[in-house]
Amino acid sequence: MSTYPPAPFPRKGVTPVQPRKAQLPVYWLMVSLALSLPAHADRLPLPADAPPSFTAECGGCHLPFPPALLTAPDWNRVMAQLERHYGDNASLDAKTRREIEGFLQRHAATRSRMKGAGDPPRLTRTEWFLREHRKVPEAAWRDGQVNSAANCAACHTRAEEGSFREREIRMPRLK
Ligand code: HEC
Ligand code: HEC
């Protein structure tokens, strides 16, 4: 990430404070945690620049899915065939479609493990999603209260707020 304007650093007459040696491992830990995202992302809040049309149009039938869960080419494919949308019709006027597509592109994932599968692609079939959910028993996806992996809120009780923390998960009671 870059800052603009560039920080005037080191400033004249100011000696930059050096981190004490003992603190360095802590910094490295923080950096590596940040770099490992979203592998351990339990917070996927709606990006602040989300146009109101995104929640209105893409949050009507299901959760307005976090844009970071699919790559840009995948979002393109989703948005290019809204009239054939996983068995539904989700078509939009051209202006709204472009607005939402721009937003999804800006926040799309760049890693290959977020590449979806299917046509249109599913974010519930990315390598990342399958790995995060490897402990979910097969029967849980088919449970009457879940029905589909896309039904995030069935298990993630605070999914609407973009929170996917482990302690907020409530799994269906399997028979
Ligand atoms: C008319 C209802 C409707 C609207 C509006 C709608 N969707 Fe969907 N969407 C669906 C249905 C139905 C599915 C399939 C759900 C399932 O398989 O459980 C789906 C699935 C998806 C999936 C795949 C989820 C998975 O399984 O990985 C994505 C991505 C998606 N929608 C994105 C969007 C976006 C972006 C918009 C707004 C442009 C949108 N949807 C608007 C009905 C809708
Ligand atoms: C059948 C219940 C279920 C459904 C449906 C479900 N999840 Fe999960 N999710 C889980 C479980 C269980 C875990 C993993 C907990 C563990 O193994 O630590 C998990 C893990 C996650 C994590 C990782 C959280 C962390 O602590 O790093 C994210 C993010 C996530 N799910 C997002 C989603 C999204 C987005 C959807 C919908 C597209 C979804 N999940 C649908 C049950 C579910």
Image: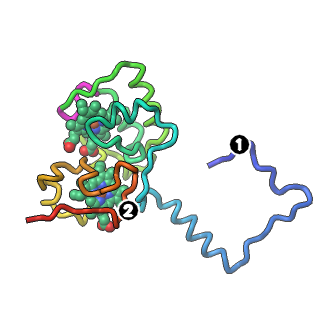
The image shows residue 162 at horizontal and vertical percentages of 40, 51
* Residue type for callout 2: Arg
State yes or no: Cβ of the residue under disc 1 lies below 8 Å from any atom of ligand 1. no
Mark 2, Cα crowd under 10 Å, few <14 / some 14-19 / many 20+, is some
Quick check: is 117 in the magenta stretch?
Answer: no
**Is residue 170 positioned above or below 45 on the image?**
below
Q: Is residue 51 visible?
A: yes
The image shows residue 40 at horizontal and vertical percentages of 42, 62
Which callout, 1 or 2, points at the residue further toward the start of the chain? 1
Residue beneath disc 2:
165
Residue extending farthest to the right is 13
Q: Is residue 9 left or right of residue 134?
A: right
Q: Which residue is painted at 38% across and 36% down in the image?
A: 55
Mark 1, Cα crowd under 10 Å, few <14 / some 14-19 / many 20+, is few
Q: Nearer the viewer, mark 1 or mark 2?
A: 2
Quick check: is 83 in the magenta stretch?
Answer: yes
Front residue of 6 and 99:
99
* Residue type for callout 1: Tyr
Q: Which residue is painted at 68% across and 46% down in the image?
A: 3
State yes or no: Cβ of the residue under disc 2 lies below 8 Å from any atom of ligand 2. yes
The image shows residue 91 at horizontal and vertical percentages of 29, 24
Mark 2 secondary-structure assignment: loop
| Mark identifier at residue 4 | 1
Q: Is residue 157 left or right of residue 31?
A: left
The magenta span reads: 82-87
Mark 1 secondary-structure assignment: loop
Residue extending farthest to the bottom is 22
C-beta proximity under 8 Å, tags 1 and 2: no
The image quadrant that residue 98 belongs to is: top left
Q: Is residue 132 visible?
A: no
Q: Which residue is painted at 34% across and 67% down in the image?
A: 167
Quadrant position of ligand 1: top left
